[in-house]
Amino acid sequence: MTETQLAPGFTAVSKCDTHNYAALFALILPLIRETARKLGYAIALHGSMRRDLDLIAVPWVDDAVAPEVLVQMLIQELGGKCPDMHKFKEGDTVGMPMVKPHGRHAYSIQLNDYACWIDLSITSRASS
């Protein structure tokens, strides 16, 4: 097995159990939380962390950045990508989120070349 750079300071084994990514997710969760905190969001874990990492991002301060900025920064920090799973508008780097109940917007982020995903639901910011 070889190690692959996942994000600055983080490496992961390139051949891992395709049915359980919990160790990888546990490794990157602090980086995700710190990145989100700097942008005005709190991150909550939802799910088993086996097949994918289900996260909920909640705006925590009045000046939380737009959801698209949060997603772009997480993609940059993690070396991931947001594939064309939803309808992209021309020029978008993140794509259109899936709209979920109660106004949540959901993005799927693929980590490097792994078959593992972060499913990120972002709750709406308060209207100004």
Image: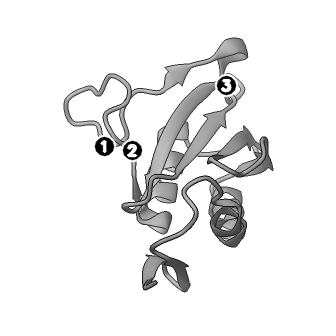
CA gap between label 2 and label 1 equals 8 Å
- First along the sequence among labels 2 and 1: 2
* Amino acid identity at mark 1: Thr
- Between label 1 and label 3, give the one nearer the viewer: 1
Q: Percent from the top left, x then y, of residue 90?
A: 19, 29
Label 2 sits on a secondary structure element that is loop
* Amino acid identity at mark 3: Ser
Q: Is residue 20 left or right of residue 98?
A: right
| Residue 22 quadrant | bottom right
Q: Percent from the top left, x then y, of residue 20?
A: 65, 57
Q: Residue at x 36, y 61 (%)?
A: 113
- First along the sequence among labels 1 and 3: 1
Mark 3 sits on what residue?
A: 128
* Amino acid identity at mark 2: Cys
Mark 2 sits on what residue?
A: 82
In the image, residue 5 sits, relative to residue 79, either above or below, namely below
